[in-house]
Amino acid sequence: MEKKNIDWANLGFGYVQTDKRFVTNYKDGAWDEGGLISDATVTITECAGVLQYAQTCFEGMKAYTTEDGHIVTFRPDLNAERMENSCKRLEMPVYPQDKFIDAVVQTVAANEAYVPPYGSGATLYVRPYMFGSDAVIGVKPSSEYQFRVFTTPVGPYFKGGVKPLTIRVCDYDRAAPHGTGHIKAGLNYAMSLYAIMDAHRQGYDENMYLDAATRTKVEETGGANFLFVTKDNKVVTPKSNSILPSITRRSLLVVAKEYLGLEVEEREVFFDEVKDFAECGLCGTAAVISPVGKIVDHGKEICLPSGMSEMGPTTKKLYDTLTGIQMGRIEAPKGWIKVIK
Ligand code: PLP
Ligand code: COI
């Protein structure tokens, strides 16, 4: 298979149109057979539920070329399960989990020429998503839906690659205590756009959101969970019902415990404790683990001991082990790797 002529090493996190996408429609209570198409555009009514009332959710995953030349994805069963939870919370029909995985496999396989080569530093980002596609004008769920999967080759989510980030404590909230923070609803991202642009205008890379009820506990950023390392080398991640259950974070806890022999704690993390941590990182499919060097709370700076020039040592070990598993250099726990080709 001849790869596309793309400058893989210099890709950012952007959209590059690839050849095929998977599409299936839900009508009269059932999904049609679905299949791959070439047309990258979507045509829907002006009154579609997604356009009027933001009835949409999505997933994010990656396909990797392994050291021995296979194309694989990482724990797609967990994306399928999370998408089911998102759909249920948004009154959308579930696309069956086995079919979700099959649609991802088909779409990646059909875009094989866009899967970045091993060692290029890039990956193929996979975006499954669903939206209400028929007309609704009273506030109610759509009765017709479209589920699609497209792919795009991507490089690092943050421009500096693995250079530590400077983030700020955000005055805006991301998710209400009993709201939709735990699902991957498009609306969670729409309402974060002002906050992220405001952070960028003030010179910060990202926002640290606190819990909306008490503003004392660390939640997550707009697109990744937090991971901290204590001075005695414990890995700590915030537990909250209003953060997205990151597949990367859940996997990193297993990596920390089972592969690196570290103690791990998933618990409430008070902002007051943050000044005592040795390392901080943002973890997610897009972010992988992006190190944080500085956290600014209304002018008060918390400088992580790991500094602003490179990842902290434990974060680096976690990063190397996780990416080693994804790229086939390190043996994966059973069921983590789905071979596509
Ligand atoms: N938190 C938010 C708000 C996200 O958008 C993402 C990205 O998917 C994550 C966390 C990380 O989740 P995952 O590791 O499953 O990609
Ligand atoms: C992902 O990591 O897959 C996400 O969906 C996060 C988004 C900010 C790109």
Image (cartoon, rainbow, N blue to C red):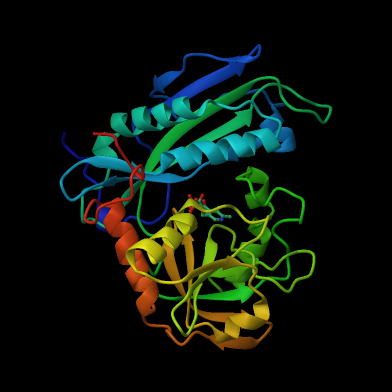
Residue 10 versus residue 214 in the image, above or below: above
Q: Residue at x 39, y 72 (%)?
A: 315
In which quadrant of the rendered view does residue 52 lie? top right
Q: Residue at x 42, y 50 (%)?
A: 14
Q: Position of residue 20 (x, y in %)?
A: 36, 28
Viewer-proximal residue among 157 and 274: 274
Q: Residue furthest top?
A: 28
Q: Quadrant of the N terminus?
A: top left
Residue 210 versus residue 30 in the image, above or below: below
In which quadrant of the rendered view does residue 136 lie? top right
Q: Quadrant of the C terminus?
A: top left
Q: Residue at x 43, y 25 (%)?
A: 39
In which quadrant of the rendered view does residue 256 lie? bottom left
Asked if residue 157 can be seen in this view, the reply is: no
Residue 5 versus residue 100 in the image, above or below: below
Q: Residue at x 35, y 56 (%)?
A: 155
Asked if residue 251 can be seen in this view, the reply is: yes
Q: Position of residue 26 (x, y in %)?
A: 59, 18
As drawn, is 119 to the left or to the right of 304? left
Q: Residue furthest right?
A: 138
